[in-house]
Amino acid sequence: MSRYTYRPPLDEMRFVIEQVLGAPARWAAMPAFAELDAETAAEVLAQAGRFTADVLQPLNAPGDRQGCRIEGGRVKTPDGFPAAWRAFVDGGWPALACDPAWGGQGLPQLLNTAVGEMINACNHAWNMYAGILHGAYATVKAHGSDELKARYLPRLASGEWLSAMALTEPQSGSDLGLVRTRAEPRPDGTLAVSGSKVFISGGDHDLTDNIVHLVLCRLQDPSNPAPPGTRGLSLVLVPAVLPDGTRNAMAADGLEHKMGIHGSATCAMRYEAATGWLVGEPHRGLPAMFVMMNAARVATAVQGLGHLEMAAQNAARYAAERVQFGGPIAARPAVRRTLDSLDAVAAGLRVVIYRAALRLDEADHHPYAGCRAAAAAEVSLLTPVLKAFATRQGFQGASDALQVWGGYGYMADYGIEQTLRDARIAMIYEGTNEIQAIDLVQRKLLGGAGPAFEALLDDLARDAGDSDAARALHEQLAQARGAVAALREAAAADPVAPLRAADDLLAGCGHLLLAWAWAAIERAAAPDDAARHALVAQGLRLVLPQAAVHWARARAALATA
Amino acid sequence: MSRYTYRPPLDEMRFVIEQVLGAPARWAAMPAFAELDAETAAEVLAQAGRFTADVLQPLNAPGDRQGCRIEGGRVKTPDGFPAAWRAFVDGGWPALACDPAWGGQGLPQLLNTAVGEMINACNHAWNMYAGILHGAYATVKAHGSDELKARYLPRLASGEWLSAMALTEPQSGSDLGLVRTRAEPRPDGTLAVSGSKVFISGGDHDLTDNIVHLVLCRLQDPSNPAPPGTRGLSLVLVPAVLPDGTRNAMAADGLEHKMGIHGSATCAMRYEAATGWLVGEPHRGLPAMFVMMNAARVATAVQGLGHLEMAAQNAARYAAERVQFGGPIAARPAVRRTLDSLDAVAAGLRVVIYRAALRLDEADHHPYAGCRAAAAAEVSLLTPVLKAFATRQGFQGASDALQVWGGYGYMADYGIEQTLRDARIAMIYEGTNEIQAIDLVQRKLLGGAGPAFEALLDDLARDAGDSDAARALHEQLAQARGAVAALREAAAADPVAPLRAADDLLAGCGHLLLAWAWAAIERAAAPDDAARHALVAQGLRLVLPQAAVHWARARAALATA
């Protein structure tokens, strides 16, 4: 019986990028990507597919078994992880979407997202090292001084150095206002950073010579005292190796023993007057950090998609090979139903997430400022929905898929139980899914994103066409409009009411996006493309009914305000 | 911050047993339990609660970390497991519900079920050894020869010896017709059993001197050849130690590396002309085995309840202690909603499962044959619903609860991630949840259990009273009647249609049972019992809306036949 393996879904990716989203024509409208064509993009993805399937996937199960350890005060990653990173750097992959001015290849985030899907499908733990890089790169690029940019951006873009985000402390999880780590100014203009951080992914490892930490802390400047809470936090760049080549006063005190992603070094970090440099303005660390959080949240949604795709394709292979009751179990209605649901959700999520990535590219590179602003507003609105909805689907899909293997699914040898364990963290980190729902409702729908929400819904409606999927989409759009109107009304009467409805509103929006994706697939698929038309029908029949529960429960929560 | 711990829910158990189910009056109607009163029963549960919380729970996390290993060809369980078993035997716990004629204490299955809930909540892996015992006891008692009964029943009842169910083979999971293990008659009347079995829980261990295997195999008797498929299977008792004190020709070849229940030895077993004795008639092994499967399936539902209770009470404790945003996180609406859902489902499932246990006692001990038959028919009908629905709720509830801990939930030190990993197996073993759904639909609803279904629904309706919960129950009853009528109609036109609707029909029935349980709690709770009335309202508001999806999807699947 075949073990876990990975077939890069290149045809599906091309279909979404070219047929559903029409990305090549939209690249042509952006000077930064004007020279990129569909064939070049497809070749990039094919190469990435080979690397992920041939290099990263074979390291996944061994990395889970071996995990990380501390030797001589330094963290060692599983066998093969450092070599795979060097191969990744040599291939130019870290720089894929980075600015050519800093040594990047300047390709769209859309391609980077598709590559990220494949990396995550094959080796989530390994990707923990790679994934943080983009957030640090974006943060230093947006908020770093020219000196910091010159010193760190080229080596972050190339992947010569990696990075870590040091936010969480034992008493300070979702509530960052409780951060206690201190940064004291020194006469030479540097900062002395002291404190303890926990759950720091890639805080120490043996993939690169240097690790650039971005540490959230309180600046202790008597001439400019820090306000209490989150308005008094600053972001400080603290490298493991200082510019003079000496090691900074920081160390990994221990490694967490986790449910999954064992190959990812989750460090408890200690900073003992470590030398650092301020990134951005004093006490403006949180806004600076949100540059990296938003990038990280979209990347986390991609993790959910990767896990779902991996679970779906391996379950389908297993079900085609495993014979019980005189035939392959794929023919059993219960198994068929699970496989069909997984396929429909994976295909739908891919469209939704890739759309967001394309809009991210337009937010950065569209020639018209109005288009950039509209795209940025859409991405900001969608980010919490994508993060929470896709990671939940990734975990739930992995669990549904595991059931296809029966008893074998519970055994470590078959791979799917690792997918389930690895997938679970994505619902928690980068802001728990419940924090995402609060962000969607409080900061976005009830904040400044009302017009962006209207614009998004109008835009989704325009894409509908005329089909069962289009009718389902219009029904979801009506539900969403009604629920958000009820939300505004309830919020005016009782400020806590939105929080009671937040999770269901987010899940409802997630299903709305799936309905749009299926309508878009229906419209883009050739008339004789029976597989894709069937997939859309499966989504409408097996998955979309769940939306009604979320809308109804959200409305009820708002009505009891 | 407090670590994982267990508070036996004795008040809840008494409320269900005494107030909701009125069990003491029903015991009084059965001669076997006529001398049992509520106080005695409560004292048994209090003692069991102390044993599970003080002895078993502290072994749970260490047992997960250490796991089992093979030393010198024999399986060793985690430190403390054998001593806990001896203490359990010394306390008389294995014999709780066994027949006094065989050394048992003759107490009701209802009490045994409540004890089982506590054992499972505290240490699922350890309970894997204890849990199999009752199935083997019941099977030998129902089908064994007088000689086998005399030799094995007293020592199984006392727990001096343990047992294993050896059914699965690599090619034969859900489809037992593919079993290849052979049993060849010998001149002395014994059988020589040869073959390989996988996934054998407790196939070897160091808890007891002897382990009594019940092995499903094909009898090779030329004078009475075995029909092909499941009609040619026989059940053979194969003890690890033979009556003359020598070891039988059987061994654990290896231990599976599993996602969870690491303290449970999941063995690959090899039988090399091992000596055994037929249990029941030749080629009638499957019906004999179903005695043990049904007992095991109800016990598996109890595992789901135990996991859910453990997750719910620890999440509530953590949420009361963990401070973020200026207050305990229990006050945050998203956390509150999760805790409320967990409480409502745990309380409802307890009523539903305890009711089934009470009916099991009536099936065995009611003085009127008609009442025994009706109770047995109800238990048979409910068994697949309880097994699949409760185990899914146990796993899903553990995952929902884990979210309350945020990042700490993903760390091994906090206990909840073990609950999630342990809980996952219960959806698979003792017949996957999908097999349960097929059993419910094909063998029960479309088989001979139509009258039992009508009787159950009438009975549930009688309990309703007049409340929001009662109205919700009547709505669920109407949905169930309509869906089953549609099922019968569709089955007549297309024999595959029921299989497409099976999982949703089962989930719908599970929600119907929860609605009944909440109505029964509402009716039994004192008027000033605000906590219980609130719990019922939470169940109706947060959990029951999900039922609509299952009924709608089931109806749609039947309509597309």
Image: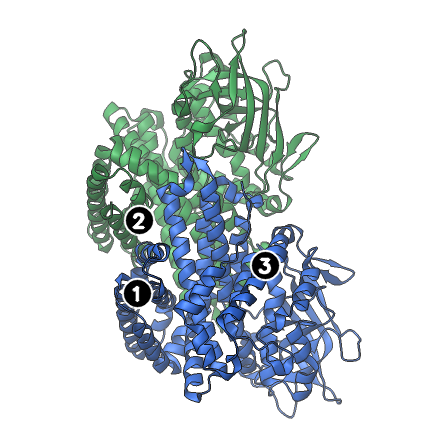
Chain colours: A blue, B green
**Circle number at residue A195:** none
Q: What residue appears at the point 26 percent right and 61 percent down from the top-left corner?
A: A468
Q: Secondary structure at mark 2?
A: helix
Q: Are marks 3 and 1 in contact (CB under 8 Å)?
A: no
Q: Secondary structure at mark 1?
A: helix
Chain under callout 3: A
Q: Is residue A522 left or right of residue B481?
A: right
Q: What residue appears at the point 66 percent right and 64 percent down from the top-left corner?
A: A267
Depicted B116 relative to depicted B249: above or below: below
Q: What residue does disc 2 label?
A: B511
For mark 2, does the 10 Å Cα neighbourhood hold few (<14), some (14 to 19), or many (20 or more) residues?
A: many
Residue B316 visible from this viewpoint = no
Which of B426/A386 is in front? A386
Q: Is residue A205 left or right of residue A311?
A: right
Q: Residue A50 placed where, x, y %?
A: 59, 59
Give me the C-alpha separation between circle 1 and circle 2: 19 Å
Q: What residue does disc 1 label?
A: A551
* Quarter of the image where the C terminus of chain A is located: bottom left
Name the residue type under label 1.
Answer: Trp
Give me the C-alpha separation between circle 3 and circle 2: 47 Å
| Residue lying furthest bottom | A223
Which of A361/B254 is in front? A361
Which of A114/A559 is in front? A114
Q: Residue B368 placed where, x, y %?
A: 25, 24
Chain under callout 2: B
Name the residue type under label 3.
Answer: Arg
